[in-house]
Image (tube, helix red, strand yellow):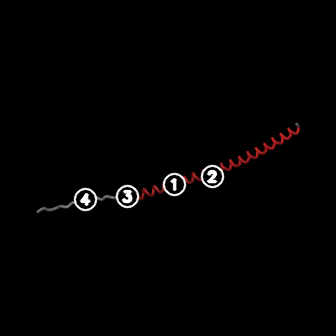
Amino acid sequence: MKQTNMYMGFLLNFYFINFRCRISELERELEEITRKAMTSQTRALQTARQMAAEASREDEASMIASTKKTRKVIMESSSKFSSA
């Protein structure tokens, strides 16, 4: 009976250590995934900002290029016809 209790104690200790190691591994994986997600999210936001700025510049340039300014000049002339 005493040997069975010792063996059970040993098994419980063994499983506890294994579970603790597995939990540590999962925590490290979670930290790495979180770090990568935050890094890629920052890159995506910067890219979105850059894309928006570029689109704005292109839109502005196309508006300037497509806007046609015209000037109408009306000249009035007075001519006197002499009738004889």
Residue type highlighted by circle 4 = Glu
Can you give x and y, in whole percent of width and height, for residue 20 in the image? Answer: 76, 44
- Element on which disc 4 rests: loop
Callouts 4 and 3 close, C-beta under 8 Å: no
Can you give x and y, in whole percent of width and height, for residue 66 in the image? Answer: 40, 57
Can you give x and y, in whole percent of width and height, for residue 23 in the image? Answer: 73, 45
* Residue located at (16% from left, 62% from top): 81
Pointer 1: what residue?
Answer: 53
Callouts 4 and 1 close, C-beta under 8 Å: no
Of badges 1 and 2, nearer the viewer stands 2
Which badge, 4 or 3, comes first in the chain's sequence?
A: 3
Residue type highlighted by circle 1 = Ala
Which badge, 1 or 2, comes first in the chain's sequence?
A: 2
Residue 27 versus residue 50: which sits nearer the camera?
A: 27
Instruction: Measure the C-alpha gap from mark 4 to mark 2.
Output: 70 Å
Q: Is residue 17 left or right of residue 56?
A: right
Which badge, 4 or 1, comes first in the chain's sequence?
A: 1
Pointer 4: what residue?
Answer: 76
* Residue located at (45% from left, 58% from top): 61
Pointer 3: what residue?
Answer: 68
* Residue located at (51% from left, 54% from top): 53
Residue type highlighted by circle 3 = Lys
Of badges 4 and 1, nearer the viewer stands 1
Q: Is residue 64 left or right of residue 72?
A: right
Pointer 2: what residue?
Answer: 39
Can you give x and y, in whole percent of width and height, for residue 70 in the image? Answer: 34, 58
Which badge, 4 or 2, comes first in the chain's sequence?
A: 2
